[in-house]
Image (cartoon, helix red, strand yellow):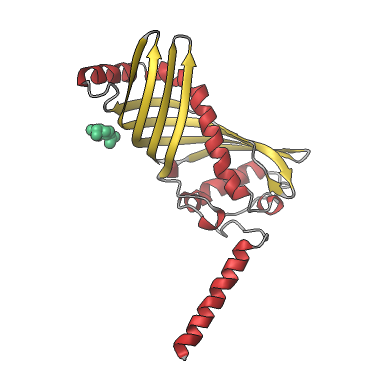
């Protein structure tokens, strides 16, 4: 009988929880996340500090807000295409793990609210990033075809960027339309296997080419990659912001 009572109580608690999650009520950010008043005269620096201090809370992920673990951040699949004159390419990245976001330093935050449209610029520096995963690539240079699939990893150092997050406020929800980043990178080292279907020599040659000219290649790819990031990041933050009140988060 006692165990039955216990079971009933447990069911009730579960049901309550379920109802709370299902209802349209706002879910709050964890209480560790402090908020800043728009009216205060140090609003920007307050926001910067609030983001910096609560960053570890976000890194672990917040399941109630559909926010996944961010360090490492897992991407199951991402596709980008590239076309520039004679060079054409398509890369599919699978099971990518991104490490390093938890060490982010927030340098400055610039909020701007105008006619129910909110824009947040955040200057971020990440000392080290390590990305690894599987890839599949195909490309051509004039009539020369190449392609392959295998493992890759990329080590980055001194990553500095501005997050540009913007969108309208509708029904007290921030509907983010864009989350753009164009990271500048101080150092990059790329490793990949099997870009030429098992031809080791060609793969080694391509790898040393990439590591010598990474900066040119990176800047050439950035507009394309940035578009893919925008879509991914916009979806990511909207999963969270669609559940929380804008006026309570940014009072
Ligand atoms: C990248 O992968 C290669 C090959 O597995 C490995 O030798 C190298 O140590 C990796 N890079 C890092 C920074 O772990």
Q: Position of residue 223 (x, y in %)?
A: 52, 22
Above-or-below relation of 237 to 60? above
| Ligand 1: image quarter | top left
Q: Is residue 66 left or right of residue 70?
A: right
Q: Is residue 172 left or right of residue 126?
A: right
Query: Which residue sits at x=57%, y=72%?
Result: 15
Query: Which residue sits at x=74%, y=45%?
Result: 170
Query: Which residue sits at x=41%, y=26%?
Result: 91
Q: Is residue 11 left or right of residue 145?
A: right
Q: Residue furthest bottom?
A: 1
Q: Residue furthest right?
A: 115
Q: Is residue 191 visible?
A: yes
Q: Position of residue 244 (x, y in %)?
A: 64, 53
> Which picture quadrant has residue 168?
top right
> Which picture quadrant has residue 213?
top left
Q: Position of residue 162 (x, y in %)?
A: 55, 32
Above-or-below relation of 41 to 227? below
Q: Position of residue 174 (x, y in %)?
A: 68, 45
Q: Is residue 182 visible?
A: no
Query: Which residue sits at x=47%, y=91%?
Result: 1
């Amino acid at each position: 009988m006692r165990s039955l009572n216990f079971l009933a109580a447990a069911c009730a608690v579960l049901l309550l929880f379920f109802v709370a999650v299902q209802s349209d009520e706002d879910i709050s950010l964890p209480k560790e996340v402090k908020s800043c008043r728009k009216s205060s005269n140090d609003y920007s620096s307050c926001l910067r500090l609030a983001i910096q201090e609560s960053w570890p809370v976000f890194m672990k992920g917040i399941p109630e807000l559909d926010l996944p673990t961010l360090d490492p951040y897992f991407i199951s699949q991402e596709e980008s295409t590239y076309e520039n004159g004679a060079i054409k390419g398509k890369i599919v990245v699978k099971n990518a793990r991104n490490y390093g976001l938890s060490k982010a330093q927030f340098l400055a935050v610039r909020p701007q609210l105008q006619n129910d449209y909110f824009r947040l610029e955040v200057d971020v520096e990440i000392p080290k990033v390590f990305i690894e995963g599987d890839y599949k690539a195909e490309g051509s240079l004039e009539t020369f075809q190449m392609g392959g699939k295998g493992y890759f990893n990329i080590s980055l150092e001194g990553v500095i960027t501005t997050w540009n997050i913007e969108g309208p406020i509708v029904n007290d929800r921030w509907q983010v339309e864009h989350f753009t980043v164009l990271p500048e990178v101080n150092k990059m080292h790329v490793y990949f296997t099997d870009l030429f279907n098992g031809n080791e020599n060609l793969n080694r040659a391509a790898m040393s080419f990439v590591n010598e000219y990474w900066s040119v290649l990176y800047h050439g790819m950035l507009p394309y990659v940035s578009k893919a990031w925008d879509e991914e990041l916009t979806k990511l933050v909207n999963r969270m912001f669609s559940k929380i009140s804008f006026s309570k988060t940014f009072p």
